[in-house]
Image (tube, helix red, strand yellow):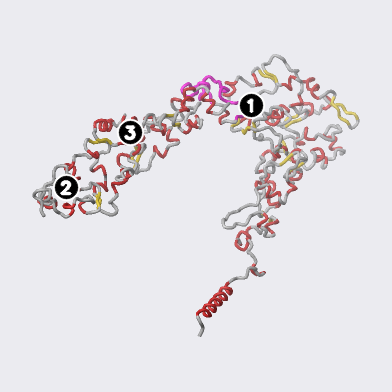
Amino acid sequence: MLNNKSYQLILITAVIITLASCVQPTQKTAKEKAKSCTDCHPKMAAKFSTGYVHEPVQKKDCSACHLPHGLIGGLFFRQEEPELCYGCHRDQQVTDKDKSAHNPLGPGKCNNCHTPHNSTFPNLLKKPQEETCFSCHDRKEFEKKYTHSPLEQGCQTCHDPHRSKNNSLLIKQSDALCLSCHQVETSSFKNAHNQYPVQGGCLQCHTPHSGDRPALLKKTVHSPVLKEKCSSCHTVNGDSIRTKKSADALCLDCHKKPAAGSKSSHQPYMDKQCTTCHAPHASDQVSLLASAPGILCRNCHTDQSLVLPPPADDDTAPAETHKGAKDAPEKITVVSAHQPVLDGDCLSCHRGHTSNYKALLKNDEATLCLNCHDAASYRNISRSHPPAKNQSCNTCHQPHASPSTFLLVDTQEHLCFSCHRREADERGRFSLHRPFASGNCTGCHSLHKAKAKGFLKQPLKNGKLCSQCHENLLSPAKNIKPHAPVAKGNCTKCHNPHAADYQYVIKKQPGQICLECHRDVSTTINTSRTRHQPAVDGDCIDCHAAHGSPHENILKKGQPMLCLTCHTDIARYWRKGVAHKPAVKNCMKCHDAHGSNEKAMTRKKGSRLCSECHTTKGKEFLSAHKNIAPGPNSCTSCHDAHGSPQKGLLYPVSHAPFAQGSCTPCHKGGKK
């Protein structure tokens, strides 16, 4: 026989052996290696395996770019673009030696052109190479009457798609690139150039992509070049072509010298520096401008405090703009810019040489602005803000760009309040309308094409203006009973448009403003001996919804839940006990809402109120009361009007004889 101690030892040993047999080995065998991404995502693996495949995808090395999901699913990258791409493609990163960079590459938007997993096109392009370029570059500029033959072989014949040590992403310096195909020693080349020993400067006369002139001559050609009268300006000495004078001096042989007396003159014009702005041979721009006005003008007219977007003509930006130089001045981001500025169309407003108006403007400011902006909208007195009516556009607006909306010279807040001082003082009041508080005057006002008085965007009538933001209040759900002013859209009946000394921008203390319409309630409050405290305090919105409610009298809650918000003790016996039915349904069955001449604000006094539902005469009533006729107004001396733990709504604590059903010790006529 085993003793208890031996039996326990055997049992413990058996348990240990059993548990040990259940423990899995900590090391996995070769067959038990962790699953790869493609084991769980076979559809994605199949999808990304066709065409040109990104090298990490070929190797099924998803972790080269993605972090494992862990407990939270999602495509988590190891680094943000472009650093993620530069991990392998560091050779494509813009360097200090680069003169130009492709616009998507600078900010690192590799996915603008490339797809990260696989593609049906080489270099993982999203589209064929030609279509990829035309996603941003206007196809019309490359499909004119005469087309440069290398263009048919693709843009990469001449351009690097990412970055270059040459301008315009060229794979070589422009002349060297041209001479790699065009042989300057051939007779055909010499004949084409009137036997002049031309060996460079190709882009001075020719457009590199396509054009409407034979030999790809630029759109506008200097008259001597077009007439092949190069000798007007040049002399030839062997293989050297020289100008007879300085280029600027040559211009004045044919063109008028700067005239004095104009109100404003362009400084290069006055200094006789023609080639600062003009090309000497040919140009794709009007008036032989050296480049598009938006680019040319910015060479000198650069406001270092404003960050303007590049003009539409600027296909590639200098590499420096993408590298974020540490010494660059602090920039102010442009919030709004004049459309001609965005289009690079400086000459729509300015003249190039002289003008009878300041800042080389084509006309006086008022007339100039109305060339584009509808004059009827700005001259109509009732619809236009006074500065606009007087055509003083620059009173409020910047002509080029602004760090504020609508080209304003300052923020709306500062600009509007610089004239509207009374409204500015309202900023110190307790409650502010949200647009007014944020300085967003144009949230409600339209200063040039106003549709209502006060230069409002919409009339106040029928709540049209307010409904732009408060549609849910002015067009409530079908079950909502709206407050009368809300139903009529008369928001200013209760609210100030800018600011007020009471919450919700209410004009007066809520009680005062409500009683201006609800005079019967005012009379009740003023003449009642017992008054509802919120009514006395003027806190009407403690009980009523200001705009609308699905409940009677636009109460915030239905009965009796509204009253129970404050009078919580009323329902203390309703769950475990007996509730007075009228109390459960509607407190107003017995009470007045605002005031009464009776205690507890009851509608009638004592038994007169109870007798509306309960018969207070007859045998049945006397029998229930031990044949004793209760005194007038004595119902609540025995009964709780709201609820009780026992039948009959009797108070839980009773006089001993009464609790025993004996009334005779105190009253005559009662049964024992």
Tell whether position 389 is magenta.
yes
Q: Label 2 amino acid?
A: His
Q: Label 1 amino acid?
A: Ser
In the shown orientation, is residue 127 left or right of residue 406? right
In the shown orientation, is residue 632 left or right of residue 58? left
Question: What is the quadrant of the C terminus in the image?
Answer: bottom left
Tell me the residue that label 1 is attached to: 348
Q: Give residue 637's position: percent from left, percent from top.
A: 19, 45
Task: Please identify the quarter of the rendering in which residue 462 is found.
Answer: top left
Q: Give residue 291's position: percent from left, percent from top.
A: 72, 31
Q: Give residue 429's position: percent from left, percent from top.
A: 45, 28
Task: Please identify the quarter of the rendering in which residue 259 is found.
Answer: top right
Which residues, given as a range, are shown in magenta? 374-402
The extreme top residue here reads: 261
Q: Give residue 122's position: percent from left, percent from top.
A: 70, 52
What crowding class fits label 1: few (fewer than 14 Cα within 10 Å), some (14-19), or many (20 or more)?
A: few
Tell whether position 530 is magenta.
no
- Distance from Cα at disc 2 to Cα at disc 3: 36 Å
Tell me the residue that label 3 is attached to: 537
Please tell me whether residue 61 is drawn above or below residue 84 in the rendered image: below
Please tell me whether residue 419 is drawn above or below residue 649 in the rendered image: above
Tell me the residue that label 2 is attached to: 614
- Distance from Cα at disc 1 to Cα at disc 3: 66 Å
Please tell me whether residue 103 is drawn above or below residue 355 in the rendered image: below
Mark nearer the N terminus (2 vs 3): 3
Is residue 604 or residue 410 the one in the foreground?
Answer: 604
Q: Secondary structure at mark 2?
A: loop
